[in-house]
Amino acid sequence: MTPSGYALAASAEMLYLDRPFLERVRAIAERGLLVEIWDWSTKDISGLAASGAQFSSMTGYLTGNLTEPDGIAALLDSAEESIKVASILDCPRLNVHGTGLDSSGLPVIPIEVTTPDMWLTAAYTLQRLAELGERHGRVFTLENLNLAVDHPGTPFARAADTMALVRAVDSPFLRMNLDLYHAQIGEGNLIELVRSALPFIGEIQVADVPGRCEPGTGEINYPAIAATLKDVDYTGVIGLEGWAKTDPDAAIDAFVAAFR
């Protein structure tokens, strides 16, 4: 925990890219940070469990979506499998999105307009996810994404959308993964966003804009964000989900300096 009361994590998917995955995980853990991973199905789970790392977050599904019958069934089935892996890794949070994404981060089925029926169905699907999380003592987090640069065509992508859905479900086992990199591109007004979303946040992720690198490489005023988090007594996790501008150790140094 930092002096401000929150913990710091970093994504092994985006740092130390010249190393095998297990070595990336160990490198982050050796820096004193929690570790975040994405698609667990491509990983050596027993190796991760034996790595000595403490995991903060992992992807909570493999396929599917929130609104179509077949997609809902696929999402819930793969969420069940993800829960089993989370138990092995003792990972408390499982991350989901408005729809399934391909290897490039694009929606498998792009959707430009979300109808009222889709909103109601998405909320019901997320309620079922929350019930699954409650049965197993894990929290699902719904991440906001940006449409302009990285994830065009993704439904329920804005932070305002994820907050509305999480608020509608109203379960401690479904929270927001508030990604400030995506929110800056899509919505801005980050300090007020943090304040309004605080009751619904399960985790905060950061990277700078443009470039999606460590704090201090772009336009976001992360010292002001850190001051706001201290002011509102945030006690969750802040995860660096960004690339290293040059050196991964320097990126972690900049991240830690911004939030410690």
Image (cartoon, grey):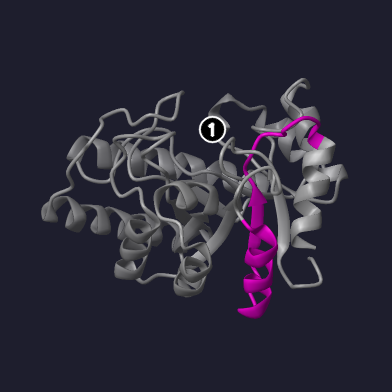
Q: Nearer the viewer, residue 156 or 207?
A: 207
Q: Residue at x 40, y 26 (%)?
A: 102
Describe the element under mark 1 as helix, strand or loop. Answer: loop
Q: Nearer the viewer, residue 77 or 243?
A: 243
* Residue of label 1: 39
Residue 193 against residue 121 in the figure, above or below = below
Going by the numbered disc 1, the residue's amino acid type is: Asp
In the rendered image, residue 195, in percent from the top left (x then y), is placed at 50, 74
Quarter placement of the C terminus: bottom right
Quarter placement of the N terminus: bottom right
- Residue 88 lies left or right of residue 147; in this view the side is right
Stretch in magenta: 221-248
Q: Residues within 10 Å of mark 1 (few under 14, many from 20)?
A: some
Q: Residue at x 47, y 39 (%)?
A: 81
Q: Is residue 203 visible in the rendered structure shown here?
A: yes
Q: Residue at x 18, y 47 (%)?
A: 114
